[in-house]
Image (cartoon, helix red, strand yellow):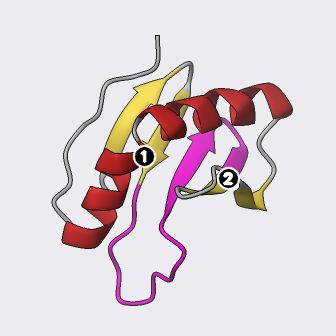
């Protein structure tokens, strides 16, 4: 699973397996916490990210929404800058 970005101890990834499903989403690993975030609406679909970490990821997802959706649709993966 390619890593798209890293910041504040969080690793942002996107799967590209035949079993992946809509809606377009990213996977977040933060220590022992995991989260799956819907790119379109920024909502956590599955997971247990702490509220503060979720808020940071949601902000980053909003800033990079068009690029993330493009990666989902084209499977052309590349790194994106961390949130500052």
Name the side, left or right, on which 63 lies relative to 52.
left
Disc 2 + disc 1, Cβ < 8 Å: no
Q: How far apart are marks 2 and 1 (CA)?
A: 17 Å
Of the 4 image quadrants, the one containing the N terminus is bottom left
Magenta stretch, main secondary structure class: loop
Nearest to the eye among marks 2 and 1: give it.
1
Name the side, left or right, on which 45 lies relative to 23.
right
Q: Name the residue under label 2.
A: 35
SS of the residue under disc 2 = strand
Packing grade of label 1 (10 A; few <14, some 14-19, many >=20) is some
Q: Mark 1 points at which residue?
A: 65
Name the side, left or right, on which 57 lies relative to 12.
right
Q: Where is residue 25 in the image (x, y as percent from the top left)?
A: 51, 62
Q: Position of residue 41 (x, y in %)?
A: 63, 55
For the magenta stretch, what is the residue range?
Answer: 14-34
Q: Residue 13 carries which label?
A: none
- Residue drawn at (30%, 54%) of the image: 2
- Residue drawn at (48%, 68%) of the image: 24
């Amino acid at each position: 699973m390619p890593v798209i970005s890293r910041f504040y101890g969080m690793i942002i990834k996107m799967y590209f397996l035949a079993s992946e499903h809509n809606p377009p989403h990213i996977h977040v690993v933060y220590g022992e916490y995991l989260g799956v975030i819907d790119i379109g609406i920024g909502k956590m679909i599955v997971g247990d990210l702490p509220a503060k970490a979720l808020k940071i990821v949601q902000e980053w997802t909003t800033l990079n929404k068009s690029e993330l959706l493009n990666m989902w649709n084209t499977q052309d993966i590349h790194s994106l800058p961390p949130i500052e």
